[in-house]
Amino acid sequence: AAGTPKPLPSSGPKSLREMPHPLATSSSEEMGPALTPSPDLLLPRSIADKDLSLPNGTPVDTSSPASSSSLLNRLQLDDDLDGETRDLFVTVDDPKKHVCTMETYITYRVTTKTTRAEFDLPEYSVRRRYQDFDWLRNKLEESQPTHLIPPLPEKFVVKGVVDRFSEEFVETRRKALDKFLKRITDHPVLSFNEHFNVFLTAKDLNAYKKQGMALLSKMGESVKYVTGGYKLRSRPLEFAAIGEYLDTFSLKLGTIDRIAQRIIKEQLEYLVELREYGPVYSTWGGLEVELSEPLEGVSACIGNCCTALEELSEDMTEDFLPVLREYILYSESMKNVLKKRDQVQAEYEAKLEAVALKKEDRPKVPTDVETCQDRVECFNADLKADMERWQNNKRQDFRQLLMGMADKNIQYYEKCLTAWESIIPLLQDKPETK
Amino acid sequence: MEECLAKKMEITVSEAEKRTGRNAVNMQETYTAYLIETRVVESQNEGQCAPVDSLWRRYSEFELLRNYLSVTYPHIVVPPLPEKRADFVWHKLSADNMDPDFVERRRIGLENFLLRVASHPVLCQDKIFYSFLTQEGGWKEMVNETGFQLKADSRLKALNATFRVKNPDKRFTELKHYSDELQSVISHLLRVRARVADRLYGVYKVHGNYGRVFSEWSAIEKEMGDGLQSAGHHMDVYAASIDDILEEEEHYADQLKEYLFYAEALRAVCRKHELMQYDLEMAAQDLTSKKQQCEELATGTVRTFSLKGMTSKLFGQETPEQREAKIKVLEEQIQEGEEQLKSKNLEGRDFVKSAWADIERFKEQKNHDLKEALISYAVMQISMCKKGIQVWTNAKECFSKM
C-alpha cells in the first residue's frame, strides 16, 4: 500500500497514537516492494513509555526481539550508498563571525534539501553556532539512547594556544560539523529524529530549546535513560568483543595521532633548516661569475621545496589529525553506549532474579520484567545494526583518510621533483651559448 | 709539452688497513695505511696488461708530499688533502677517525688528491711525486734531502708582508678576498647541510612507527586488515630508504669540502705574491736609501737624518779618505742591489704570470667541477623524490584495497 511518505518511527518522545504503522512505505524506492503491515511485526516502542499498544488499542506482542528501527537500519545499509535513493541532503558552510557586546562567536550556514514529508518545505537555510550542534547532540543522546551518535569536534580549545577565529581552525571545525550532520542524515533512524528536524528548520532555535525544557519539566518525565545502579555480571560475548575492539581501536588511533604529530614536528624542524640552507647558495652565487646562475637556481629550487613542505604539514594538521581525533571521540561515546546497554541488561537480570527468588508460581512473567526484556532486546538489536553500519562507514572513512594522506605526500614529492627537474637544463647550460 | 702523468699511468688508492706501530717517541699508536696501486698504461699493446705496482703510505706521508709541493711550487694552486679529522658531521655519522665509513671516504679523497696532482701539467712532472707513487723505502729521506723545509716562508714573515705590502697586484688582492668569502660560504653551507641531513633522517625514521602500528591495528580488523598491513610494510621501506640517500649525499659534501680546502691553497698563492712583492718593495726602498746616502756623502749635504750623520757632527767630520771608502762600499752595494732588484722584479713578474696562468686553469676546473657537483646533487634529489612518489603510491594502493 504505497502512500504518502510517513515519518519512520523513532524512539523519541512522540506518543504512540501519533505514530503510523512502522513499515508504511514512503514514496522513495528504498523500501522496495510495499511491505504490508502485519500484526505480528513488532511496533517500535518508545522505551520510556510504559504502556505499549498498537494504535488500534490491541496489546503489543512482545515475543519477537527485533525492533523495526534496527530492521530498517539493516535494510538501508545496502541501499544508502546509492545517491539517487537519498531524500535528504545537508551541508554546513559559510562561517561568519559575530561580534556582540557580551561575546564573539562564529555561526555556520546549515542548508537542507529534501523531499521528505516530515519537512514542510523542500529547502531550508538556517544559521547555527557550535552550542546549537552541541544541544542537538545531547538531545539525540537522550532521545536515541540505543543508537550510536556521531561525535562533535572538541568543544573546548585552550585560549592563547589556538586561535578560535583563525581561518584554519574555523575551516577544520566546519568540516567536522558538516561530517557530523551528514552522518546523522545517513542514519535511517536518527535522520528522522524530531530534534534533528527542528535543528535543520527552525528560525529561532533558542525558543524551541526553552520550550523543550519547559515541556519536559511539565511532564515531569525525564527522557534520560536512568536505570538504577545495577551491576552486570558478564557482558555477552558479542558485546564484549565490540568493547575490546573499541579499546584496541582507540588505543591504536591514539598511537597514530602521536606518530602523525611527531612527523609534523620533525617536518617543521626540517623546514627551519631548509630555510637557512637555500639562501646560502644564493650568497655563494653572488660571489661567483659563471656559477652564479646555477647557484641561484639551486637556491630557488630549495625555496620551492620549502613551500611544498609547508603545504604538506598544514594539510596534515588540518585534514588528517582532526579526523583521527574525531574517531577517538566516537569510540569513547560508543563505549558509553555499551555501558548503558550493560545497565539495561543488568536491570533486567536483577528483576528476573528477584522474581525467580520469590518462587511464586506465576503463569506469566510480570510485565515489569517483560518490559526490561524488551528493552534489552531492542537495545541489542539497535546497537548491533548501528555497529555494522559504523564498521562499514569507518572502513570507508579511513580508506579515504589514509589515501588522502598518501596523496598529499605524493603531491609534495611531485612538486619537489618538478622543481629539481626544471633546473637540470639550467645547470647544464654551457657558457658559450650565452 | 709532456703529457700528464695521469694519462700514462693508472693510479688508485685501493685499500685501507689498520696498523699499529711505534711512533717517534716510542709510544704505541694505531694508524691507517693506504695502498697505492699504479700501473703503466700501454697504448700499443692492447691485450697485454702491465703489472700492478703497489706500496703502502699513511696520511702523514701524504701531508709531507703536499707540503713539499706547496713550498717547491708556490705559484701553483696545489690540490688539497681530504680532511684530517671528520668535520661537519651530522649526528649519525661518526667523528671517529677509525670509523670505517670515514676511512673509506678518506681513501677516496686521497685517491682524488693523487689524480689531481697527476693531471696537473706542472706538478705531475715532479720526481718526488713520482717516487711517492713508486718507491716505498727511503722516500721520506729523499724528500727531506731536498731541503724544502728551509725554503718555506715562516708564517710570521708572511703575515708581516700581508700587512705592510704597499702595491700588490690588484688581481691577487681580489682573489684573496674571494678565497676568504668562498671558505666562509662553503663552511656555512656544509654546516647547514649537516643539520638538514639530521632533520630529514628524523622525518623518515618516524614513519617507520606507522609500520608497527598499522600491523597491530590490522590484527583487529577484518576487511581493512590486509590493506593496512601491506601499507605498513611500505612505511618501513620508506623509513629505511633514507640511509642510502644520505650516504650518497656525503659524496656531494666531500666535493664541496675539496673546494673549501682549495680556498686555502688559493690564499697561499696570494700570500706568496704579497711576500715577494713586499720583498721587492723593501729591496727597492733599501736601494733608494743607499743611493741617497751615497749622494749625501758625495755632495756633503745632509738631507736625511741619520744617527751617523749626527754623531759625525758631534764628534767631528770624517776624513775624506774615510768618506771615499764609504762611498765605494755603498756604490758596490748599490750595484749589487740594482742587480738584485732587477732579478727580484723579474722573479716577481714571472711569478705573477705563471701563478695567474695556473689560477685561470684552476678557475676553469672549479667551475666545471662545481657545476658537475650541483648537477649530481640535483640528480640525487630527483632520485629521492621519485622513490618517495613510488613508496607513497604503493601505500595508496594498499589503502585503496581497505
Image: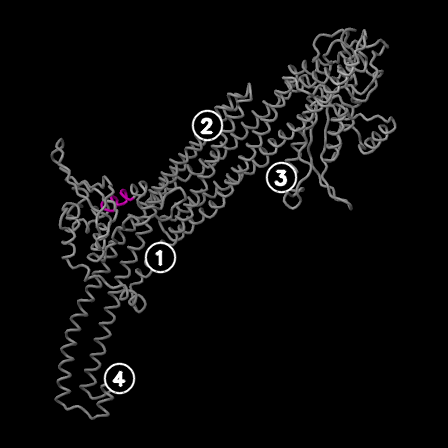
User: Pointer 3 indicates a residue of which chain?
Assistant: A
| Pointer 2 residue | B234
| Pointer 4 residue | B304
The residue sitting at 65% across, 32% down in the picture is: A175
| Pointer 3 residue | A168
> Badge 1: few (under 14), some or many (20 or more) residues near its Cα, within 10 Å?
some
Residue B148 position in % (x across, y down): 18, 59
Residue type beneath disc 4: Thr
Looking at the rendered structure, the secondary structure element under dot 3 is: helix
Residue B365 position in % (x across, y down): 28, 47
Residue A92 position in % (x across, y down): 69, 31
The range drawn in magenta is B106-114
Counting residues from the N terminus, which is met first, the one under dot 1 or under dot 2? 1
Determine the CA span between mark 1 and mark 2: 47 Å
Dots 2 and 4 on the same chain: yes
Dots 1 and 3 on the same chain: no
Dots 1 and 2 on the same chain: yes
Residue type beneath disc 2: His
Looking at the rendered structure, the secondary structure element under dot 1 is: helix
Determine the CA span between mark 4 and mark 3: 84 Å
Dots 1 and 4 on the same chain: yes
Residue type beneath disc 1: Asp
Counting residues from the N terminus, which is met first, the one under dot 2 or under dot 4? 2
| Pointer 1 residue | B180
The reply to whether the magenta stretch includes residue B402 is no
Of badges 1 and 2, the one in the foreground is 2
> Badge 3: few (under 14), some or many (20 or more) residues near its Cα, within 10 Å?
some
